[in-house]
Structure formats: C-alpha cells, structure tokens
Amino acid sequence: MNFTGRILLALVVAMTSLSAMSVKRSDPSAGDDEIRIGNLMPYTGRLAEFAPIGKAEAAYFEMINERGGVNGRKVRFISQDDNSDPTVALDLTRGLVERQNVLLMFGSFGTPGNLAVRGFLNERKIPQLFVASGDEALSNPKAFPWTIGWQPSFRAEGRIYANYIQAFYPNRKIVVLWQDDQFGRDLYKGFQEGLGDLARMIIVGVAFDLADEHIDGHVSILKRSGAEILVFAGVPATASQVIRLAAGSGWYPVFILNDAAASIGTALTPAGTEKAAGVISASFLKDPSDPAWKDDPAIKEWLSFMDRYYPKGDKGGIAALYGYAAAETLVQVLKQCGDDLSRENVMRQTASLRDYRSAVFLPGIKINTDPENFRPIQHMRLNQFDGLTWQPIGDVIEDAFSGVAKK
C-alpha cells in the first residue's frame, strides 16, 4: 500500500471510531440540541385533579430551557392525555417511542397505565423514570430494570400508619374507607401488614369508587360501628367530603388521611379547617399552603416560579409542587449524564443518586438509589393538623418491608 493509501485508510478508521463514539454518547432521540421526553397525564377524566403534576413539569422544563437547557440541550417535553385508561396509555406510549422518538418516559401518572406500558418499555430498553405511582411493582429492578418509581410506596405509607396506631392507640376499634383501585388496595394492604396479628382491630373496611354518590352513607355506617379511628385512602375531593360529613354528624375519630389527599389548600380548607383539626398524615413534601413555610426560601422560590411559568396553577396544591420536585429530580439525572445521553447511561445515572434532595422536600427527606434500590424516596414524616398548620410528630420515618424504623 502506498503512502496515499495508508493516509486514506487511517482517515476511514478515524471516522469509523468517531462514529462509534457518537453512537455511544447518545441515542438518536437525544440530538445535539434537544432531549425528547415523553409523559402521560390524566388531563381529563376521573383523576384530572392530578393534572397539575404534568402542567407543573411542563412549566419547570420551560424554565430550564429559558436558562439554557441541560448541558446545552433544550428539553422537549411531550405530555399527552391518557384519560386514566391503560389501553390508551399503551397506544400513546407506542406513538411517543416509535413516532416521536422520545429518549425516555418520565413521571407518567397512575398505577394501571404505568403497569400497562412497563413490558413494552422494558422490552425496548427505554427508561421509564420516576413514575407517579407508589405501587411497589413499579420498583423491581431485577424483573424490570428500565422502570423506577419516585415517591414512597403506598404499602409503606400504610405500614407507617399501622405502626403509629400501635404505638399511640393500641386496642382501639379501626375502620377504613378506601378507594377501590390499585392505589387504595395497596395502602390498605400495607396497613394490614403493619398491624400484623392486630389487624383484628379493623372492624369495618368500606371500598368506594371515585364516582360513588353514597359517601354520606358510608360515613354513617362507619360512625355507627363505634370505631375510634378512621383511616382514609383516596383523593383530596373525597377526603374533604368525608371530613365534613364526619364532623357534621358529631363524629370525631382519630382521623388518618393519606398523603396524596393531605393538602391544606385542596382538602382541609374546603372541608373547614376547624373540622379538619386533629387530622394525621404522613408526607415528604412541604405543603405550600401551610403558613409554617410562608418565609421558607424554597417555597418563596416556588411561588415565584408559579407566578412566572404556571400562573393559572393552584399555588396551594400539592400536585403542582409534586410535579416541580419530580422534574427537578429528572434534571439532576440528565445533568449527571453529561454528554453521554445513551439510554444505558440515563439508567446508570438514575441508579446513582446519592443523598439528593429537593429544597421543597421536608427536612430529613433524601433520595438515594443504586442498581438494587429503585425506590428513591423511602422516608416520610408524620404530621398532625392543628387547625392552622401541620405539626411534626416524632422523627423522619424510613420504611422497610418488614416494618418501620425511626432514623
């Protein structure tokens, strides 16, 4: 081979190597100036009260893009309405992957929809990140290494309430009013697990549908049982209704309210704060409608964010704050990816979060992940509403499947 031929061969080898490096650095869905992210939300339908999660996420990415994007790339957030229908969720996800060519799916809402698309995404090796569901089945890295949760699990939350009752209200009669879906069943199951042999303390459990028109009848039945403790698992609108009905009938049990429904702005104030006084819940986010945080720098920054990027959003609702904090977590992962936006590296960085915390987390709440831990947030704090603010009960609590331990 002559000198010119050797030069040409060297150039071909170099170009081939550069091409290989480029493929390794990023997937086709992550261009030089754009990162495409897919998302599904119930913008319409029975769970539309959680739509602010997606709207706040869109607003957060708008803010990030205005500030230059992530490592020089703008985020293109493609959020679609699945109407809380798993069949629609699968069809939309296929479209986002096959036609929109998204790099990953992020923060999609609800257990049924996320379970419906999990197999498809894992088969295609597409990250399904920080799903907006507390179902533990969505945090199983051995079986589904491309799917990871974000919030504390529903069963863990139920176990926390069970441990609290055993410590402070032993041998009391308990009734449970729970939403008849995977969320409600999971929380109720965790509650029973936490009670163990003491599950006999539960004398009545009533399931209700989101469209149930007989909540007043259910509350009446529960009151007549003579129970001293009421555990509720459902959405904020129903929680508010139950609080009003119980107080209106002169029934004031120890009232335990699930985290997703425990917002001063969207549940307790509509119910009447005097009626809601004494309610107990576990949480991991600051409640932006709680006067206790009015001078908190993070909440002030959050309010400024809402004013500028999501002015029509409910500043007192937990849903929008949840979306903000989840989007913030994803941006942290993308920053850690640097210039390597291969899907493999996205999952590697997702499983490499160390003591990460959003400023809107409650004190002591942190995110830690590793290849065997796909439950990023495993801590909650018990609080009791005093009619004005949430008052902490004890220390931050970490859940383990076999029980809970104080940290």
Image (cartoon, helix red, strand yellow):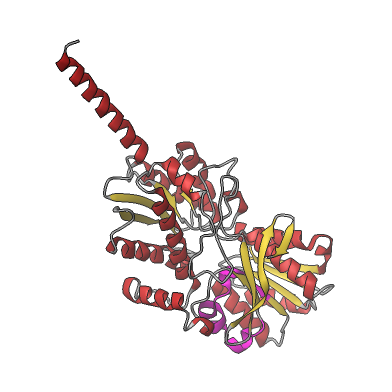
Observer-nearest of 245 and 117: 117
271 drawn magenta: yes
Q: How many labels, in total? A: 0
Give left or right: position of 109 versus 67. Answer: right
Residue 289 position, x and y percent, is 50, 80
> Is residue 42 at least partly visible in the picture?
no
Q: Is residue 21 above or below residue 100?
A: above
What secondary structure characterizes most of the magenta part? helix
Q: Is residue 347 visible?
A: yes
Q: Residue furthest top?
A: 1
Observer-nearest of 92 and 170: 170
Q: Quadrant of the C terminus?
A: bottom right
Q: Nearer the viewer, residue 117 or 212?
A: 117
Residue 366 is left or right of residue 298, and the answer is right
In x, y percent, where is residue 359?
A: 48, 69
Query: Residue placed at 29% from the left, 63% from the top?
Result: 67
The answer to which image quadrant residue 204 occupies is bottom right
Q: Residue furthest front?
A: 3
User: Which percent across, then down, holds residue 246?
Assistant: 67, 82
Residue 262 on the magenta span: yes
317 vs 96: above or below? below
Residue positioned 52% across, 85% down in the render? 291
Q: Magenta stretch: give its range.
A: 256-278
Residue sitting at 61 percent across and 89 percent down?
274
For the N terminus, give its image quadrant. Answer: top left
Q: Quadrant of residue 191?
A: bottom right
Q: Where residue 26 appears, x then y in whole percent?
A: 35, 41
